[in-house]
Amino acid sequence: MKAVGWKPTDAWCCYFAELVAKEAFGPGPTWDALDKLFSPNCQATYANFSQSKMFKVGKVAKPGALAVWRMGKTYKGHIGIVETVKIDAAAGVRVFTCIEGNTNAAGSREGTHVLRKNRRVVWTNGAGLNLTGFIYLL
């Protein structure tokens, strides 16, 4: 992750997402665009992609998209890569599996691992993780 700008004092979920995106696209024009769009801050990253002509953002979870959350009403956030999406018929909600850096088994945005997490599409969660939206890389 040092290759994409990470320093030991930084939270690293955005750096992890950027590294995976760059590995998927490989060097070239898209790689260069990603350099300008990703930020160490998840909310800034979402805002950058929102203004991009190369990528779209939206409110629907799709495999390959980046899920972006805001922590309560703070500037802090979290980001992960959507792997699968399904409907939880019993709960009547959309759920998705996400690959996330800087998380832990409890689902914190401050963690020590890259983990596969099961998430619900929740737009408001008080002081917890509130979905901002999804960045579509494909």
Image: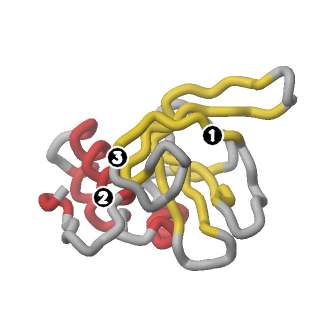
Q: Secondary structure at mark 3?
A: strand
Q: Residue 15 — which label?
A: 2
Q: Nearer the viewer, mark 3 or mark 2?
A: 3
Q: Residue at x 26, y 62 (%)?
A: 35
x and y, in percent, of residue 91 in the image: 85, 29
Q: Residues within 10 Å of mark 1 (few under 14, many from 20)?
A: some
Q: Quadrant of residue 26?
A: top left
Q: Is residue 10 above or below residue 125?
A: below
Question: Where does residue 76 sit, x and y in percent of width and height?
Answer: 52, 73
Q: Residue furthest top?
A: 89
Q: Nearer the viewer, residue 17 or 47?
A: 17
Answer few, some or many: residues within 10 Å of disc 2's Cα (few below 14, many 20 plus, some between 14 and 19): many
Colour setting: secondary structure
Front residue of 18/28: it is: 18
Residue 81, disc: none
What is the spatial separation of the Cα atoms under label 3 and label 2, in whole angstroms? 13 Å
Element type at mark 2? helix
Q: Amino acid at mark 1?
A: Arg
Q: Residue at x 68, y 24 (%)?
A: 86
Location of mark 3 (residue):
113
- Alpha carbon separation for disc pair 1 and 2: 20 Å
Q: Nearer the viewer, mark 3 or mark 1?
A: 3
Residue at mark 1: 119
Q: Is residue 89 left or right of residue 31?
A: right
Image quadrant containing the N terminus: bottom left
Is 29 on the left-hand or right-hand side of 14? left
